[in-house]
Each structure stands twice: as structure tokens, then as C-alpha cells.
Image: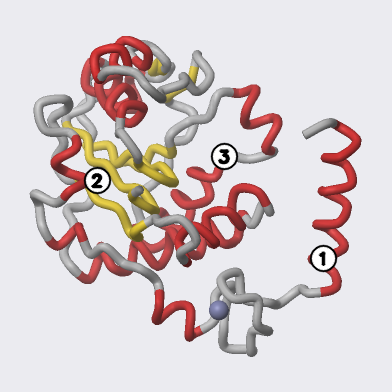
Amino acid sequence: MQAKQKYYFDWLNEVGKVLFPNNCCGCNTPLNNQEDTICISCLAKLPRTNYHRLKSNPVFRKFTGRLPVVQATSFLYFKKGNLAQILLHKLKYNKRQDLGERLGGLFALDLLKDGFALPDLILPLPLHPDKEKLRGFNQSLCIAGGLERWLEVPVAAQVVKRTVANPTQTKKSRYDRWKNVEDIFAVSEPAAVMGKHVLVIDDVITTGSTLESCGRNLLESGAKAVSIATLASA
Ligand SMILES: [Zn+2]
């Protein structure tokens, strides 16, 4: 998007927020006083995976033979046009950081209810600084905020830096993808992760290569264990 277009888009977005301040992020109907960000009807329709109830779930199995993880799970199924896609789009492109925190909180409540082993630290997967500057925020940090609040586990947002922007991953073999994401992170504060069980958070998992790369860096820097939790799974 060109700068001028982006300016008008952001401006319209702000006007929209003033005109329609309290509509559901899922279906756009007005929220009542008891509802927060998502209406009760959309809450009931969230396409939960409940993967965390099963150790060897499809997200966990993505890391088999690639990265030893204690637990790996996703909150929602992500499909083209489904409620998860609508919500993630609102979070990332309409900059609804409050929605990220709300979804992170709902995810945390499910994890707590079903005895998900609590980590020592929550690490939102870092964006490249240029990308974060462009978007204005890191969506994984918002999700991590909701998890932190309910799991009562601290977020460590600064201990890992992303040194390479998002690699292109389409039409590449697994080996090429692996090479491509091998060194895109650097642990800048190894002492902070030493001996810790770190839960890495991202918005959507597809191949898992980026999370794998970050997880490997953490283990090489002395983390005791790594778990993975994403808001959605494609
Ligand atoms: Zn709704």
C-alpha cells in the first residue's frame, strides 16, 4: 500500500472506531454491556481445536523430528473465511490489539482448565523491527499479554531478536525452508532463558519453520524446554 493510501486507510479506520465503537469483532453486531470485544454468539462459535487436551496433536506432530517440544497447540482452526480468519484479520490489519489480548485470555482459560503444563516464561515470536515499525505493533505480543494475565507467567518480549525479515517459504523443499529460516533469530539475553521452560507464541502456524528456528535458538542458548502455542492453525 502506498503511503498516501495507507494514510487514508488508517484515517477511515479511526473514523470507523469512533462511529462504531462497540461492535463485535466477529459479526459486527453491537455488543451489550456484558460483552467484551466478541459477542456471546461468536464466542460460542469459535472454532476451537482443543488440541491441548491431546499431547500428540496435529500441531505437536509438525515438530516431530525437527524440534523437541514439551507441548504444542493452537487455539482455533484457521480456514479461509471462517471466524478465526475474520478475527485474525481484525487483529493484524485493523490493529485491534485489544482483540489479540482477549483471544489470548480465552486461550489461557482453556489451557488452565485442562491442565496445560505451565511454562516459566512466555515469548511472543518477534517480528523483524522493520515489519513491526510498519504494522505499529507485534500481534504475538498482544496474544501473549492475554496469556500472561490469566496464566500468571511473565512475558519476556526482549530476550530474542529477529535479525532477518520473514523468508519466503512457498515452493521450497523442507530442507530449503530449513536453511532459509536457520538463522533468523538471535537470543540477545541468554541469561533470561537459561534453565527455563519457554512457551513461544505466534498468531498462526503453517509449516512451523519459523517457530522451529526460534525454538532451536532457545535450546541452544540454554533454555530447559520449549513449548509452542499459536492462536490459530492453518
Ligand atoms: Zn459476534
Answer above or below: position of 156 versus 233.
above
Instruction: Determine the secondary structure under disc 1.
Output: helix
Q: How many marks?
A: 3
Within the image, what quadrant is residue 68 found in?
A: top left
Question: Mark 2 = which residue?
Answer: 119
* Sequence-earlier tag: 2 or 1: 1
Q: Amino acid at mark 3?
A: Asn
Within the image, what quadrant is residue 138 found in?
A: top right
For image coordinates 53% across by 29% down, the residue present is 127
- 1 and 161: which is toward the camera: 1
Determine which of the numbered discs, if any, sits on residue 16 in the image: 1
Q: Distance from label 2 to label 1 (Cα)?
A: 39 Å
Q: Nearer the viewer, mark 1 or mark 3?
A: 1
Can you give x and y, in whole percent of width and height, for residue 44 in the image?
40, 81
Determine which of the numbered discs, if any, sits on residue 138 in the image: 3
- 223 and 161: which is toward the camera: 161
For image coordinates 39% across by 46% down, the residue present is 154
Answer few, some or many: residues within 10 Å of disc 3's Cα (few below 14, many 20 plus, some between 14 and 19).
Answer: many
Residue farthest toward the front in the current orientation of the protein: 171
Can you give x and y, in whole percent of width and height, for residue 155 in the image?
42, 43
Can you give x and y, in whole percent of width and height, for residue 106 in the image?
40, 67
Q: Nearer the viewer, mark 2 or mark 1?
A: 1
For image coordinates 49% across by 85% down, the residue present is 40
